[in-house]
Amino acid sequence: MKDLAVLKERIIEGYRISKDDAITIVNSKNKEVIYEIANEIRERLMGNVFDLCSIINAKSGKCSENCKWCAQSSHFKTSVNTYDLVDKKTSVELAKQNAEYGVNKYSFVTSGKALSNNDLDTLCEYIEEVDKDTNINVCASMGLLDEERLKKLKAAGVVRYHCNVETSANNFSKLCTTHTLDDKIKTIKICQKLGMEVCSGGIIGMGETMEDRIDMALMLRDLGIKSIPINILNPIPGTPLEDSKKLTNEEILTTIAIFRIINPDAWIRFAGGRLIISDIQDKALRSGVNAAITGDLLTTTGATVLEDIKRIKDTGFTILE
């Protein structure tokens, strides 16, 4: 493990590892050393600060896209709740509550390939009120929007836009055919051009290889992404992935660690599927994670905000304000 220790110091000094480096690391027999290295890189480059964000599922279901993992796709028969835009009062009050808890960011998330102009205008009104009435940073995840609509969101107060790449370039078309990875990257680059921060990550456990996960992590690094949510597939009955094989704890922890090692100064964020790994969450917090989506998630239930804050502080972190 001497070579890994040397590599760790080089990463801390500014070296960014190659794909061959990453493959060598994940193939190391002593996985505990990998986790320790990832944790030390996180601690030395980013300190013990933890970033929390929350979301509101502002529009649910009836999505035209055929993403195989998604309960909200109209192509599949699932039991997901379906509704149009939530009301302003609900969305603003939830934002205020999260702000009072000390959550740093609050994201409006909508189903569909791209939000309509009318719905966008309505949500911009909500966003302006949240921005005016709270100190919470507002984020948005509203599909593959063009530059004009993204400008509207920025003007309304959105500081960060979320658009997952989902998986590797090699694997994407096996999971979705109604839009492409290039469509997503185009949206990401427009946001960056406009000066918005970008949150982008993916889902593991969809039949991809560890090499696919490494490729995704490298792609995110090349795109300059500094907030990377890692979702663990929670197979939804009625979707094509409902019988997917559960990942082992080792696979999950190794994936988290290599994402940290490849993206040493990014926020590596717990996202969907956290309840699946409740028994190893503390270990994941010591394997490179330093951010999380808290509260209820999109179509599954997440941990409560106060429970999350206590657990994170008990692990030695302070919450980013």
Image (tube, grey):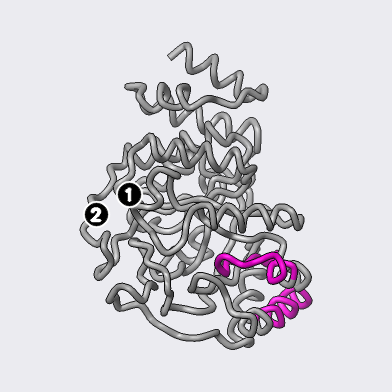
Where is residue 206 shown, x and y percent of the image?
Answer: 32, 51
Q: Quadrant of the C terminus?
A: bottom right
Tag 1–tag 2 contact (CB < 8 Å): yes
Alpha carbon separation for disc pair 1 and 2: 7 Å
Q: Secondary structure at mark 1?
A: loop
The residue at the point 70 percent across, 53 percent down is 192
Who is closer to the viewer here, 66 or 69? 66
Q: Which mark is residue 10?
A: none
Residue 263, quarter of picture: top right
The residue at the point 42 percent across, 64 percent down is 178
Number of residues whose C-alpha sits closer than 10 Å to that of mark 2, classed few (under 14), some (14–19) or many (20 or more) = some
Residue 42, quarter of picture: top right
Tally the marks: 2
Mark with earlier residue (1, 2): 1
Q: Which mark is residue 205?
A: 1
Mark 2, residue position: 244
Where is residue 254 shown, x and y percent of the image?
Answer: 39, 35
The residue at the point 35 percent across, 56 percent down is 175
- Residue type at tag 1: Gly
Who is closer to the viewer here, 241 or 135? 241
Q: Is residue 47 visible?
A: yes
For the record, the magenta segment spans: 123-151
Q: Is residue 313 visible?
A: no
Q: Secondary structure at mark 2?
A: loop
Number of residues whose C-alpha sits closer than 10 Å to that of mark 1, classed few (under 14), some (14–19) or many (20 or more) = many
The residue at the point 43 percent across, 53 percent down is 231
Residue 302, quarter of picture: bottom left
Where is residue 251 shown, x and y percent of the image?
Answer: 33, 39
- Residue type at tag 2: Ser
